[in-house]
Amino acid sequence: MTFPTRIAVPDNVLRIAQKLEDAGFETWCVGGAVRDTLLGLPHHDFDLTTAAHPEKVRELFRRTVPIGIEHGTVAVLDGKGQPHEVTTFRKDIKTDGRHAVVEFGGSLMDDLARRDFTINAIAYHPLRHEWRDPFGGADDLEKRLIRSVGDPNWRFQEDYLRILRALRFSARFDFRIHARTLEALKANVSGLAQLSAERVRDEWFKGLKQAQKASRLVHLWMSTGAARIWLPEIRDTGDAAREAKNIDRLPRDPVLISSLLPSDPPSLLTRLKCSNKDIERARAIRDWRERYPDPRHLPAVRRWLAATAGYADDLLSLLPALDSSRLPSLAARLPSIVESVRAAKDPLSLGDLAVNGDDLIAAGVRAGPTVGETLQRLFDEVLDDPARNTREYLLSRV
Ligand code: ATP
Ligand code: MG
């Protein structure tokens, strides 16, 4: 690939680079934005890498936020308060598979050498319009390849998260993983066990959102063994493979997708240290994903809506991904029936009843558990026929 003579770098980023260069510190654009620009994709903000040490960066600019000072990253706020990441040239001095310990004072070449993949290790000088691509990243972009910078075995052992990053980038750009990188990746997959659940979850969720096809990311996690370590509930059965294809019909919602594939979604989400809210959601999906109502039977649909409450929409959005032989005509009919039930404003929770506990007590029901039981019985009647939801009718039934 030949590099374009120049690429458009936003003015605010240019001004930051100019100021650092004027102060005598070499400064380059690196990482995701350079890669995405070369791919012709829209991209987020340009990250800068500089010879200036973090304290120096903080001295030079009026407004900065030390977002990862131990890694040398300072956010410089522009006139509009937008942050731009500026990171000091780093070299790795020590690693334990979970965190790289970095040292400042390296050169641009050291900094590029510690980056994960060749396509992420291309630098562009925003003022001189020069390129540095010591590892052939541009060629790999052209060949659509994910390839480790340096010896893949060693690079994965330095930081096992790079294994999951390789899978994510592969699914995101639909790039192959280079043979030697893939071989090392598989050989080191058991090292993933050392990572923290939070980092793994972030990678898995980000990957599901960014992948061109979520099914490809799932396939990569399964075929390399990464799923076996962190997502063992997703079993490599024929069923799982079929459903994995169907997930491309789902909205890009990582919790929803993670709740369809595994045998026991809440256990998977608990391992990934997801929020209680997400785990509850997964639990509701597990409990209901094989118990859809018959759309021809309105009371059953109302009962289902009342019981699934806040999770009904999740369950509806799963329908297109469920095995359709198992659920004939459901996917086609249930959503519109639900819509009509909702449009009719049929009572779907106890709170929608035309009477409340006080009304029952005034009508002679003894205070205590009987009140709740009676309300529930009345609610059942109303779910069968919403026309019964009047004060007169319900009190007449007490
Ligand atoms: P995205 O568009 O997802 O943000 P990105 O390439 O910008 O993609 P980041 O996670 O933001 O990815 O990281 C920025 C850059 O930092 C990467 O392009 C890569 O050069 C480097 N990098 C990030 N994480 C690692 C890692 N674990 N090991 C080595 N280099 C890394
Ligand atoms: Mg980025």
Image: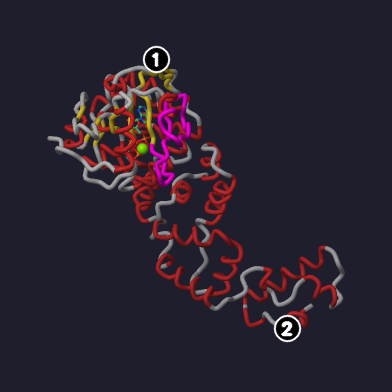
Quarter occupied by the C terminus? bottom right
Label 2 belongs to which residue?
393
Q: Residue at x 62, y 74 (%)?
A: 347
Q: Amino acid at mark 2?
A: Tyr
Q: Amino acid at mark 1?
A: Ile
Q: Is residue 70 magenta-colored?
A: yes
Instruction: Tell me the quarter of the image containing the N terminus.
Output: top left
Residue at image coords 66%, 72%: 352
**Does the magenta portion include 162?**
no
Residue 134 seen = yes
- Secondary structure under the numbered disc 1 in the rendered image: strand
**Residue 336 vs residue 278, the one in the foreground:** 278
Question: With 315 as the anchor, is 219 left or right in this view?
Answer: left
CA gap, disc 2 and disc 1: 78 Å
Decide if residue 352 is on the left or right side of residue 229.
right
Magenta range: 59-84
Q: Tell me the residue that label 1 is attached to.
A: 93
Q: 79 or 383, which lies in front?
A: 79
**Residue nearer the viewer, 271 or 329:** 271
Q: Residue furthest left?
A: 2
Which of the marked residues, 2 or 1, is nearer the chain's N terminus?
1
> For the residue carrying disc 1, how many other residues have a C-alpha within 10 Å: few (<14), some (14-19), or many (20+)?
few
